[in-house]
Amino acid sequence: MAITPPFFTKREPEVAPVRSVAPLSHGNINAPSHAPSSVASAPPVAAAAGPSPAKEGGSKLTVGPNIKLKGVEITDCDTLVVEGLVEATMDSRVMQISERGAFKGSAEIDIAEIHGQFDGNLTVRQKLVIFGTGRVHGKVRYGKVVIEEGGQLTGDIQFGATPVPKLAGSERPGLTLAV
């Protein structure tokens, strides 16, 4: 059984490879390099990182904490993660708003997970999940909805991601909110 050191310990300083840059002699481009062979043969950083996760899981845009993204149209984005403030229109597959995140504008998406705030027009084609800290206000259309205890949903709420025109003289069953 191996003994591991405590979590908070002083790390040994890492030794960085020494790079020496030799001046080119008399402008000869083909002059041999005097850099150590380990540095000269190192693969490019991008190749060492492997395939990008965006290609495997689709395109993902993360708006980090304290970032404000205003007045844009977001397209061709599979997943939007909002940790800051976004004022935009978008059409996406998945939207995740963190507890401190806020989205204002218009969004048409497949799946929404709201921990923070959404204000505007929201059309969720498949499933809208509002967590206990989530607040959704505006014109909301959804396929399925899950609201955790404490979550809030207010405004013009309608079942069905695409509004169905009312037939003359008939009422459509659904969720009715008093405003």
Image: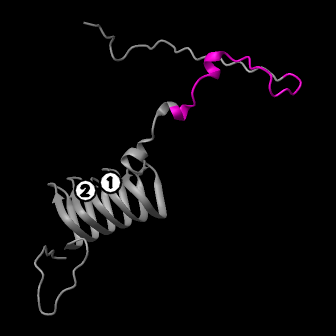
Marks 2 and 1: CB-CB under 8 Å?
yes
Mark number displayed over residue 134:
2
For image coordinates 18% across by 62% down, the residue present is 145
179 horizontally vs 28: left or right: left
Q: Is residue 177 above or below residue 125?
A: below
Mark 2: few/some/many CA within 10 Å (<14, 14-19, 20+): many
Q: In the image, which residues are magenta?
A: 25-47
Q: Earlier in the sequence, mark 2 or mark 1?
A: 1
Residue most extreme to the bottom: 168
Q: Secondary structure at mark 1?
A: strand
Under circle 2, the secondary element is loop
Give yes or no for residue 174 being in the magenta stretch: no
Q: From mark 2 to mark 1, how far is it between C-alphas?
A: 9 Å
Question: Does the stretch in magenta take in 44?
Answer: yes
**In the rendered image, which quarter contains the N terminus?**
top left
69, 165: nearer the viewer: 165
Q: Choose top left, top right, bottom left or bottom right for residue 166.
A: bottom left
Q: Amino acid at mark 1?
A: Ile
Q: Is residue 162 left or right of residue 64?
A: left
Residue visible at 48% across and 12% down in the picture: 12
Q: What amino acid is labelled 2 in the image?
A: Gly
The tag on residue 97 is 1
Q: Is residue 38 above or below residue 145?
A: above
